[in-house]
Structures are given as structure tokens and as C-alpha cells.
């Protein structure tokens, strides 16, 4: 946080933070996959599919303590065999991992204001992302099969 504070001022744009954030996010996901693999090896089991659920939040205390209003924090990722709901909280991301190493982006749910802007200006954004957000707002992003583990609802 101190490094970010030293680089941040009121004129900084979100895009200025994006390359570093994306690199940290990539590293966090790769670390999750590696640690999950090691745990499975150690315990002698495998997971045909699991999820990595990550929240990215604006660090409210950074503005007060360090005078840095634009500090983002990747909250500790969660590996889980059950699929989390995209409707539980804003600013969260989900990847699935199949065969212990095949990583697939599932979704990213931003704040409601951001969703509204993206859907009002779809030509400014990736078409697949706009489609995913439209499915989210239509309550069609989830299917019951997403919540089955070994054929059972969990």
C-alpha cells in the first residue's frame, strides 16, 4: 500500500494502475492454482473442477492514512469446489480451473453504476463482456448445473 501511495496523486487515472493490478491478479491466480495442486498431491486426491473467487476493493484507509485515494487491493483469493453466485457482492471475479491447470475466466461483476454505464454504451466495450453483463442483469448468468458437485446440489 505504501508503494502505491508513493506513486499515487489526485491526477492519476485508473488506467495508470491497471498494468500493475493485472500482473498482481495473474500472479495471485497462478499461485492459487499451484498451491491447490500441491495440496491435492500431498493429500492424494484430485479436483476435476474448482473455482477461484477474487474480490478487488478500493482501499478506503489508504486515502486517510497515506493520502492516496486510488489504492486498489486484491482480497485474498478463495479456492472452492462450489461455484459462488455472481449476485452476492459487487467487484468480484471468478475463474474456473479444470484438470488442475486449465484456467478459464467465468465472470467479473462491477458496481451497479459501472454496469449501467457499460450497458448504456456497449459499443465502447468488449462485446462478450457486454453480453455477460446483460445476462447478469437478466438473471441468466447462472444455471442450476453450475451449483452441482458430483451431480448433487450443494
Image: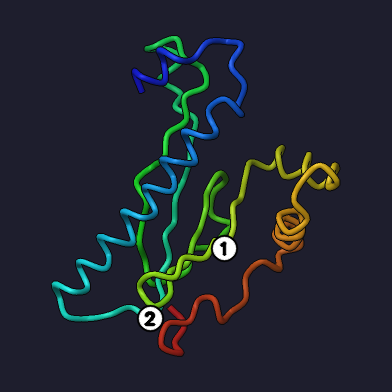
> Residue at the spot x=42%, y=60% of the render?
52
Residue bearing mark 2: 48
Is 123 situated left or right of 133 in this image?
A: right
Give residue 30's quadrant in the image: bottom left
Q: Which of the two residues, 140 or 39, is positioned nearer the viewer here?
A: 39
- Which comes before the other along the chain, label 2 or label 1? 2
Is 53 situated left or right of 93 in this image?
A: left
Numbered marks: total: 2
> Residue at the spot x=36%, y=19% of the render?
3
Where residue 152 sits: x, y (%)? 44, 87
Instruction: Check disc 1: other Cα within 10 Å, few if <14, some if 14-19, many if 20+.
Output: some
> Residue at the spot x=44%, y=41% of the render?
23
For the rendered model, the colour scheme is: rainbow
> Residue at the spot x=37%, y=51% of the render?
77
* Pointers 2 and 1 in contact (C-beta within 8 Å): no
Q: CA distance from mark 2 to mark 1?
A: 16 Å
Residue bearing mark 1: 106
Per the image, label 1 sits on a secondary structure element best described as: strand
| Mark sitting on residue 92 | none
Note whether 15 is above or below 25 in the view shown. above
Note whether 33 is above or below 7 in the view shown. below
Where residue 116 sits: x, y (%)? 77, 42
Where residue 47 sits: x, y (%)? 33, 78
Amino acid at each position: 500500500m505504501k508503494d502505491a501511495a508513493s506513486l499515487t496523486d489526485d491526477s492519476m487515472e485508473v488506467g495508470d494502475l491497471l498494468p500493475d493490478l493485472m500482473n498482481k491478479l495473474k500472479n495471485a491466480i497462478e499461485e492459487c492454482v499451484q498451491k491447490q495442486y500441491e495440496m491435492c498431491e500431498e493429500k492424494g486426491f484430485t479436483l476435476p473442477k474448482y473455482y477461484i473467487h477474487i474480490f478487488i476493493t478500493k482501499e478506503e484507509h489508504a486515502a486517510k492514512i497515506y493520502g492516496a485515494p486510488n489504492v486498489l487491493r486484491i482480497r485474498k483469493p478463495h479456492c472452492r469446489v462450489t461455484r459462488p453466485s455472481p449476485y452476492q457482492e459487487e467487484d468480484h471475479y471468478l475463474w474456473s480451473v479444470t484438470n488442475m491447470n486449465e484456467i478459464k475466466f467465468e465472470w467479473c461483476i462491477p458496481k451497479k453504476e459501472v454496469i449501467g454505464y457499460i450497458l448504456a454504451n456497449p459499443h465502447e466495450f468488449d462485446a462478450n463482456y457486454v453480453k455477460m453483463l446483460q445476462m447478469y442483469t437478466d438473471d441468466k448468468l447462472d444455471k442450476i448445473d453450475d451449483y452441482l458437485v458430483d451431480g448433487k446440489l450443494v
